[in-house]
């Protein structure tokens, strides 16, 4: 329930919708939410919607190694964004989701990922870059799990996500050329821990017209250089 509260951000949840999303009876969801509100892990606004509470933020701030890694991402990401006149994002894997840790660059009207955004891995190049870097069996099981969670998506949207995943597998890195948002493209590469397992990603997002064949190779090279520079700075609990 906490994950769902955080994932919805400032939009918040109606009790009935949150109960349905979590697969809980209305009364059970209400009891859990009441306990979370008492502990300041959840908050009910005047419009009756539930959002994450202040204790979620306070607990996060206390994890200094994570905060330091997030801060270390800002300048390299900003440098890439300026160089390519684009948006650059660092995201960390969180189970079957990704969480945006850093975002720099000029705003894009169609872009909805901000620092703190949490979504299923397969819904963005940031997550797909991690997915396609996993061992094949694990990767396919994770994709299947994500699609089960995205039951509300129509067939056209699911088809676009499958096309993005397939193209990324073939390329060896995350790539979307209007698969997620019309007119927008993205390239992403994984960060790996000391054992070679992906734990995060660096992704560049730009108008698709900027992602020509000749530029994509150079963008991938720049993203990989940034990923390799940031990998040693991640706390071992993340990596």
Image: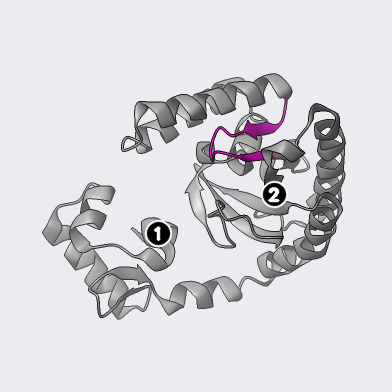
* Label 2 secondary element: loop
Query: Which stretch appears magenta?
Result: 172-186
Is residue 234 part of the magenta span, yes or no? no
Residue 41 coordinates in the image, percent (x, y): 38, 73
Give 105 or 223, whichever is nearer the viewer: 105
* Occupied quadrant, residue 30: bottom left
* Label 1 secondary element: helix
In the image, is 56 to the left or to the right of 30? right
Q: From the viewer's perspective, is residue 126 above or below residue 99?
A: above
Give 58 or 109, whichever is nearer the viewer: 109
Q: Which mark is residue 8?
A: 1
Residue 129 coordinates in the image, percent (x, y): 66, 36
Q: Residue at x 13, y 57 (%)?
A: 26
In the image, is 51 to the left or to the right of 209? left
Location of the N terminus by quadrant is bottom left
Q: Which residue is mark 2?
A: 239
One can see residue 141 in this view: no
Q: From the viewer's perspective, is residue 36 above or below residue 98?
A: below
- N-term mark: 1 or 2: 1
Residue 6 coordinates in the image, percent (x, y): 43, 62
One can see residue 219 in this view: yes
Residue projecting furthest to the left: 27
Q: From the viewer's perspective, is residue 181 above or below residue 16?
A: above
Give 74 or 23, whichever is nearer the viewer: 74
In the image, is 232 to the left or to the right of 145? right
Residue 191 coordinates in the image, percent (x, y): 74, 43
Q: Residue at x 55, y 32 (%)?
A: 179
């Amino acid at each position: 329930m906490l994950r769902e509260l955080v994932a919805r951000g400032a939009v918040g949840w109606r009790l009935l919708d949150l109960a349905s999303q979590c697969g809980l009876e209305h009364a059970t969801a209400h009891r859990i939410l009441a306990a979370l509100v008492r502990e300041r892990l959840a908050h009910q606004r005047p419009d009756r919607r539930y959002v994450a509470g202040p204790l979620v933020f306070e607990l996060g701030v206390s994890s200094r190694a994570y905060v330091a890694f997030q801060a270390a991402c800002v300048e390299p990401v900003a440098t890439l964004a300026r160089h390519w006149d684009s948006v650059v994002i660092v995201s960390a894997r969180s189970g079957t989701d990704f969480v945006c840790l850093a975002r720099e660059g000029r705003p894009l009207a169609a872009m909805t990922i901000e620092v703190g955004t949490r979504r299923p891995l397969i819904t963005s190049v940031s997550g797909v870059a991690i997915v396609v870097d996993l061992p094949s069996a694990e990767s396919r099981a994770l994709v299947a799990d994500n699609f089960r969670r995205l039951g509300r998506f129509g067939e056209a949207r699911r088809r676009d996500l499958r096309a993005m995943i397939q193209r990324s597998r073939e390329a060896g890195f995350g790539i979307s050329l209007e698969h997620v948002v019309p007119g927008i493209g993205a390239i992403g590469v994984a960060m790996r821990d000391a054992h070679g397992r992906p734990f995060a990603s660096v992704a560049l997002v730009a108008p698709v017209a900027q992602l020509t064949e000749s530029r994509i190779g150079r963008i991938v090279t720049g993203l990989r250089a940034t990923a390799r520079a940031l990998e040693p700075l991640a706390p071992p609990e993340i990596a």
